[in-house]
Amino acid sequence: MGVPPMKHGQDARATPVNKEFCKILTDKGKRKKGIRMIRVFGAMMLCAATFASAANLLVNGGFEDELTSAWERRTPDSAARKIWRATGEGRSGAAAVLENVEPVQTRLRQGHDRSIKIKPGSRIELTAWIKSAMNAEGVTSLQIYCMNEKGGIVSQPIAVGPGGTFDWTRFRLRTVVPEGTAYVMAYLQINQGVGKAWFDDVALTVRQPPEPLPPEPTVVLFSDLPDDHATVKNAKILFGAGLVKATGTPTTALANAAGALALYDGALSSEVWPMLKGFTEKGGRVFMDMRCFAAAHGSAAVAVKVGDPAVKNLQAQMQAGLKVVREDDATAGFATGQVIPRMGWTDGKLLVLPQDFSAEGLEVLAEGPSGEPGLVKQTIGKGRITACDLLSLREPFYRNVDAYHAFTPVSGALGNPASFGQYYPKKMPYDGVVAEMRRLAEKYPAISIEDEGEASGGYRLWSLNLGTPGKPFYFLYSSAHGSEWEPGYGLMTFARHIAEGRMRDAVDLSAVRIKIIPLINPSGYDKRQRQNANGVDLNRQGDYRWERYKGRDSNNDGAYGPFDYDWKGAAPFTEPEAVAYKRIISDPTLHCILDFHGNTSVKANKFGILPVTAHPDNEDRALAMQRIANLRLRGRHLLRQNDEKEPSQYLLDFLIPNSGIPGLMNNGAAGRFGFLIEMTCGYGESYGTVLQTDFVCEMCRALFIAYR
């Protein structure tokens, strides 16, 4: 991740937060202090040794040989640009020189031949010494490309330099190689301006090998469905390597299993039910599709109509499902009386149990439209069997309101519920959000609500506040882009969980002060638009490189100005929301900031962005935060977004440095700690909020552990 570049004579020092440190941070006090300190010291020494001895994966990084020995001109020489090797002009010996005759992009790269292969999960660092004689518009940068087997981009983090003219300065870019990476490329680049930049002593190193993940819990699949059946494929994605198909002697697999999954479209084998009952009696958890659950009890599931697929109204679609009558792991996130959007496609039919169905230990968790048992739990011995219709549903696609949370009862029933998720049955107007904030402040003594001042369009900004004045200050906010609204609901949910004492393992209110602004762009929220009421992109209102930032005329009115996609405003911090932000971040006790953004494109979310201005330790803490949250979220949520070919687990996939835009975070986190998360949001209604609020709360919880 990018950090402010170091001047001549300075160097980077590793300050990693590795798995041992994560263990200590999440320790609940069971280990003795002396042992904890030994582990911290040992872990730091191990990582320091790894960093010090890391080999350079680049060939000819000092340019003492001709460029053609390893480097490729990604942009060939032309009248607009040149790349050459200059002897005696480097920081030591030769250097690679990139020159722009015109304001274009000029790039030199290595690894294009697929020669640099690094294990996914590795923490890597690209460093270079750079000197620039470019004009004020010139930009120098380092970039890493992580590529898949087909040559597609998995991630492309970039570290941008200060621009203009400067003497030899050491740059660094750190990232984690994401899953699916087959090879890595290193890029040296200049862009926009005119002039020359010299690059020398370039190195790509592995700072830390992959941290092994604990094995995924074993879930044994009993099914007569083919392996390529959509539901089976989705189960494999959700449970990963932990999903084991019952073959040979399934009792052996069940002996070490965390759960079992039974999906039958035909007759249930007479041998399966006794095995599942025996597993359950000993404390096992089982999820069954309603077809085989009914068959196991000598009955048959019946089809009832729970919705009309022809109806396009989102609110109507959200009411087509099963009404929760009892809170349970399988209904986690949904309160009693709420409807889990869930209907079969294409006829709107869903399979439920007959009205007169009965079985010992049976509890109805959710009902069909006429009170039919639609989601049930049966307690047998020390364990439980949960059942509902899964095979009638479409895939968990972000537009499939009826199946968005298709697998949520499955993961919940098998022991991994949406721990902090909360379903909001409707997107509220801003006044309704403020009313909900007031309700929280009235109900919970730990929460207070404050007026943060004016917002554009005649609105007021409101915040939720917790903790102890004078203690390290954490500032959490969302929806600087008004259409990206759902994380704000997650932040309100997080405040409630803190007040209810459900975050004690992460948040000590006697030791911190917290300010939460769920919706920092009220007018944009109400209008579901990116900009505020004055047409300004609030996340371009910071003063970091504001003058150099060049937006685009997205509305094609002939000028870059109000209501263009990223209009930065007349000057930095001139919009009332940005004025309030600047006042808040001026607090000398400010320690850490968390900012939420997002959209429906998986190519533009599921990642964290780190401010280039932050404390040098910020990236290591961010990596710890990512790991802490993902270990809890793994195997919990399944979603396919608009540019995915199939669903994927919803996790924070990777981290990248900020590209140097005048984002608010580059001001707020300057010299401190900060993290911006891009997540799935921006929907027309609130049907996705169990996943969204659960994800937000897990990220916030992890923040308070990693950024203590």
Image (cartoon, grey):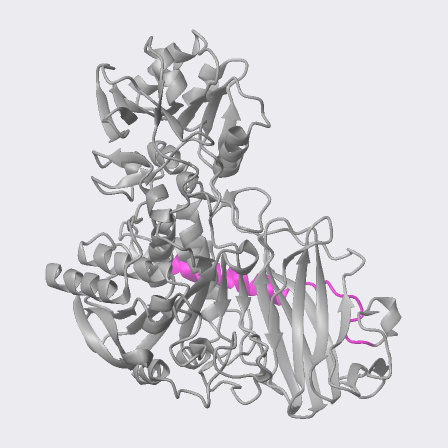
**Numbered circles on residues, count:** 0
In the rendered image of this protein, does residue 522 appear above or below residue 116?
below
Reply yes or no: does residue 42 show up in magenta.
Answer: yes
Residue at 49% across, 33% down: 235
Report the magenta residues as a range: 37-63
Reply yes or no: does residue 590 show up in magenta.
Answer: no
Q: Is residue 146 left or right of residue 680?
A: right
Residue 489 visible in the current orientation: yes
**Toward the viewer: 283 or 548?**
548
Q: Is residue 471 left or right of residue 233?
A: left
Place of residue 55 in the rendered image (x, y in percent of width and height, measured from the top left): 69, 63
In the rendered image of this protein, does residue 577 appear above or below residue 149?
below
Q: Which quarter of the picture shows residue 390?
A: top left
Classify the position of the N terminus by image quarter.
bottom right
Place of residue 657 in the rendered image (x, y in percent of width and height, measured from the top left): 54, 70
Place of residue 342 in the rendered image (x, y in percent of width and height, measured from the top left): 37, 36
Q: Which quarter of the picture shows residue 669?
A: bottom left
Residue at 18% across, 70% down: 449
In the rendered image of this protein, does residue 381 appear above or below residue 229?
above
Residue at 27% across, 56% down: 493
Q: Which quarter of the picture shows residue 359?
A: top left
**Toward the viewer: 524 or 481?**
524
Classify the position of the C terminus by image quarter.
bottom left
Place of residue 491 in the rendered image (x, y in percent of width and height, measured from the top left): 30, 61
**Toward the viewer: 149 or 89?**
149
Residue 468 visible in the current orientation: no
Q: Is residue 498 left or right of residue 148?
A: left
**Toward the viewer: 230 or 458?**
458
